[in-house]
Amino acid sequence: MAGKLTTHMIETAKVPATGQLFLWDGELKGFGVRVGSTGVKSYVLQYRNPDGRLRRSVYARFPVFSVDQARKEAIRMLADVTRGVDPADVKESKRTAPTIGEVCDWYLEEAEAGRLLGRRRLPIKASTVRMERSRIDRHIRPLIGHRKVNALKPADIEAMQADIATGKSAADKGKGRGRKTTGGGGAASRVISTLHSMCEHAVRLGIIDANPAKGARRMASNRRTRRLSSIELGKLGAAMQVAATRDENPTGLAAVRVIALSGFRLSEAQEIERSWVDPEGAAVHFPDTKSGAQDRPVGRAALKVLTAQPEIAGCPFVFPSDYRDSHYKQVPDVLQRLCIAARIEGVTPHTLRHTFSSVAGDMGYSELTIAALLGHGKRGVTQGYIHIEEGLREAADMVSAKIADLLDGRASSVRDGDHPPIERPLAA
């Protein structure tokens, strides 16, 4: 065709009975329109790619794109060719790009096989993978699992975060053993962290080209400062005593009490194995925690609960599940029921952990000692030399005893007249 391709030429082009007809522009070489036997008219660009092969790319429909729009796009594509980029390859890459769901499948398989490194350049922990699988299956897959990774932008990720925060992905636990998914701001922020981390692994190993979560702003999570007062600890203890006479699960009640008396994290308390408990050394030897392997001091009040749990043949856990094939997982549910009975609000297992540290602070113990009692990650050189010695055991014992007295209604508030102990220096 000698002249410039126009709208009138395309509209009046004869539809072939079979095959296809091409109308080529007389000014921009390779730019044209393909007319199919069904009457569909599409813009095409014919060119030689960087390897010298003749390629033809169909890239837009008429009249969705005007002739001028299609011409500008053809010029842009030809410019890419001069830079060594083949538009046909780009189009194929987009078509075959993985979805977020496919990246999730790859990540979970690699992480569970121990082939991905997390903190401290060690394989990602099994407990972390379980937690991330839950976030993926409950939030990421339902909301964006079908989306192509290369089509997502930070705005899409932030939109997903907002959906999670408002409960769009909330779901009942159904018939399984899991817990209800409620969403919320904190959950939304943690899901974005999981998505970002997963995609960073995928980018580093060449699975995807870019991390769609990079640059997405995460919701600020309020620092959890809720602690139980002495009166609230008394109410919780009274509710536990009443629940023990009714139909509440005794394993769950014992686990709640252990968290309150030890400051253990929820996962640490629920997953304790009998072989880790050392009554003689007044400690629990965790082979792995959020901060690595630890020997954690435990007071006698907490040890009494741990050692009193009935042993089940073949089950290594101090707090076994009702199915006896794993550890107990319903502590948050038990605690919620207790708090409803006690008429206290805003309490989670972390609240019990924070209460333990707060009581220790009220009793005059230093931040360094409290950090050691809680098993916090090392924040400095000095903390790296902390070992369980008599002073630390004594601190764990006294804090545990004080909380036990408050739970059982035998003591007043630390702030109402107790004198803080003279703290012994920790061994270095």
Image (cartoon, rainbow, N blue to C red):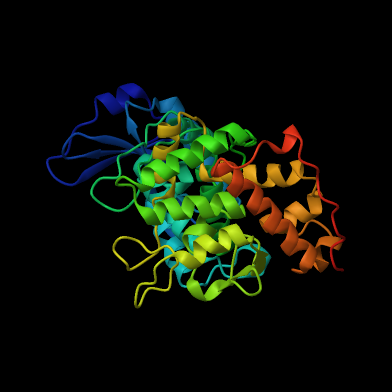
Q: For residue 68, what is the image quadrant?
A: top left
Q: Is residue 220 visible?
A: no
Q: Residue at x 40, y 36 (%)?
A: 182
Image position, residue 371 (x, y; %) = 74, 54
Residue in front for this viewpoint, 123 or 147? 123
Q: For residue 108, what is the image quadrant?
A: bottom left
Image position, residue 61 (x, y; %) = 32, 33
Residue in front for this viewpoint, 341 or 241? 241
Horizontally, residue 257 falls left or right of residue 178, namely: right
Residue in front for this viewpoint, 337 or 226? 337
Image position, residue 424 (x, y; %) = 86, 59
Q: Is residue 179 above or below residue 316?
A: above
Q: For residue 300, what is the image quadrant?
A: bottom right
Q: Residue at x 69, y 43 (%)?
A: 359
Q: Is residue 6 visible?
A: yes
Quadrant housing the C terminus: bottom right
Horizontally, residue 16 falls left or right of residue 322, namely: left
Image position, residue 294 (x, y; %) = 66, 68
Q: Residue at x 29, y 47 (%)?
A: 247
Of all residues, the one furthest to the front in this rendering is 410
Q: Is residue 265 above or below residue 73?
A: below
Horizontally, residue 196 falls left or right of residue 152, namely: right
Q: How many marks?
A: 0
